[in-house]
């Protein structure tokens, strides 16, 4: 049976030799093709995942080829024996055409192989790391600017991405996979690079930390336009931006943002999720925490986290607490073990002061009162055995709360004017989150 191209892409995780390719070579030299000896066990509809096609992980994209924005403006034709490269800042001194930045990238990180469809058309690039499974994507990684097609940045189950100012994969249904990240502001998509076909997939935090430690820290992953899926494990002091606008500012929402999903597993502490536009779903497996801090302290925003973006999302956003189904909702403290507290705030504006000088990170803890009286909600969960206690966490501009996943899960309407949660009608179908994509993190 012919494997799908996505299977070939994923085989770079499961068997790095299965998809061969040259580094920065011509588009017809060793490029990824549909046929491969390895049929990767990619998630499918039975696991709650969309069906891929040969151009995109979720089947959302059928490009009209050729694309005129896959190649670097200067190094896209192989002139004078130069490599054929994706967009980037590949010269240290542009006037000298020295390719010094490319040599730095290739020596320390790896190269790229073109992604080709069954008709021989190129639709993207895949990183070929020097160290498959454990690529340290930092330093010269900043020279890569992303293309308008599919960019597969698979750093491996032990890979890391960190310590450079900003990165961007541009338009197209991109895939980013890594275990660790810190000191980074990274965009898989952005309103500044287009977004008509920008359904991105991010798998962050490969592996599990039984000691309560964290792998995704002091960074923000922006997915921008489109309908994006983000899977994060072991996150602390970091953010997931699903649809902020103006290149990821928290006071703007991206006009091309769609319905997004983020699944949070493992150890989760002091993080932010920004939904943007669309009907967004956030699934938090709270009981997986090996809690080493007094409180967990996240903040959830259905839209943005500051200014005009706070209340200007017309979508219906749902927070799913993957805790035991039937956990009762209470309205007063102290929160009994095995219960979820939901209560309102008084409508004051309480800013998170340390972030206020950064337009891509600033947010409010309590976000004031909207023109129609909406306010931030306070929620708290305490597990039945009291090993997990979230402390107060703050939820702004979410319309629904789900308690539990699977049999017995129930969806509640959030009234953030009155500060209450009430069961929705029988027509409300509980969210069943997709399986964690183990095939990306073998």
Image: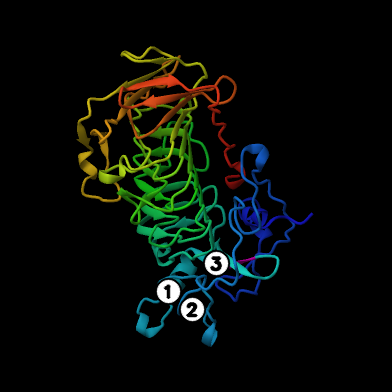
Residue 112's mark?
Answer: 3
From what the image shows, is residue 198 above or below residue 125? above
The quarter of the picture where the C terminus appears is top right
User: Quick one: SS at disc 3?
Assistant: strand
* Disc ID at residue 90: 1
User: Given contact means CB atoms under 8 Å apart, are the residues at marks 2 and 1 in contact?
Assistant: yes
295 vs 55, nearest the viewer: 55
Which label was assigned to residue 75? 2
- 89 inside magenta stretch: no
- Mark earlier in primary sequence (3, 1): 1
Which of discs 2 and 3 lies nearer the camera? The answer is 2
- Residue appearing at x 58%, y 75% in the figure: 25
Q: Nearer the viewer, residue 71 or 287?
A: 71
Image location (x, y in percent) of residue 316: 44, 36
Give the Cα distance between marks 2 and 3.
13 Å
The quadrant holding residue 118 is: bottom right
Label placed on residue 414: none
- Say which residue appears at 59% left-offset and 72% top-offset: 66
Marks 3 and 1 in Cβ contact (< 8 Å): no
Cα–Cα gap, marks 2 and 1: 8 Å
Disc 2: CA contacts within 10 A as few (<14), some (14-19) or many (>=20): some
Spatial CA span between label 3 and label 1: 13 Å
**Mark 2 and 3 residues: CB-CB less than 8 Å, in contact?**
no
* Drawn side of residue 407 relative to residue 210, left or right: right
Residue 305 % position (x, y): 30, 42
The magenta span reads 111-116
Q: Residue furthest right?
A: 1
């Amino acid at each position: 049976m012919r494997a799908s191209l996505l299977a070939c892409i994923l085989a770079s995780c499961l068997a790095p030799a299965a998809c061969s390719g040259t580094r920065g070579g011509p588009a017809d030299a060793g490029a990824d093709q549909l046929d491969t000896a390895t049929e990767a066990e990619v998630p499918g509809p039975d696991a709650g995942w969309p069906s891929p096609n040969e151009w995109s992980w979720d089947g959302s994209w059928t490009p009209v080829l050729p694309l005129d924005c896959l190649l670097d403006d200067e190094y896209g034709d192989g002139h004078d024996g130069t490599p054929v490269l994706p967009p980037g800042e590949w010269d240290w001194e542009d006037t000298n055409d020295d390719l010094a930045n490319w040599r730095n990238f290739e020596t320390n990180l790896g190269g790229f192989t073109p992604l080709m469809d069954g008709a021989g058309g190129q639709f993207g690039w895949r990183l070929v790391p020097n160290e498959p499974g454990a690529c340290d994507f930092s330093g010269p990684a900043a020279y890569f600017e992303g293309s308008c097609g599919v960019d597969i940045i698979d750093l491996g189950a032990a890979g890391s991405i960190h310590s450079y100012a900003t990165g961007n994969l541009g338009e197209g249904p991109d895939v980013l996979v890594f275990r660790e990240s810190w000191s980074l502001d990274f965009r898989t998509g952005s309103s500044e690079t287009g977004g008509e076909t920008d359904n991105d997939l991010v798998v962050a935090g490969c592996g599990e930390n039984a000691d309560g430690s964290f792998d995704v820290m002091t960074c923000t992953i922006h997915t921008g336009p489109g309908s994006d899926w983000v899977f994060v494990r072991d996150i602390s002091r970091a953010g997931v931006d699903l649809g902020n606008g103006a290149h990821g500012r928290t006071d703007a929402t991206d006009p091309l943002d769609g319905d997004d999903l983020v699944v949070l597993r493992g150890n989760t502490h002091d993080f932010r999720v920004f939904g943007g536009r669309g009907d967004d779903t956030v699934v938090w497996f709270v009981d997986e925490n090996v809690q080493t801090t007094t409180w967990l302290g996240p903040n959830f925003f259905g839209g943005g986290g500051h200014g005009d973006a706070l209340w200007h999302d017309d979508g219906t956003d749902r927070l799913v607490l993957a805790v035991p189904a039937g956990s009762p909702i209470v309205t007063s403290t102290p929160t009994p073990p095995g219960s979820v507290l939901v209560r309102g705030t008084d409508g004051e504006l309480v800013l998170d002061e340390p972030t206020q000088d950064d337009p891509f990170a600033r947010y409010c803890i309590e976000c004031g009162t909207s023109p129609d009286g909406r306010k931030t909600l306070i929620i708290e969960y305490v597990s039945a055995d009291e090993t997990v206690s979230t402390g107060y966490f703050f939820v702004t501009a979410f319309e629904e709360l789900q308690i539990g996943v699977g049999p017995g899960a129930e969806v509640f309407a959030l009234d953030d004017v009155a500060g209450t949660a009430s069961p929705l009608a029988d027509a409300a179908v509980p969210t069943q989150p997709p399986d964690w994509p183990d095939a990306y993190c073998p």
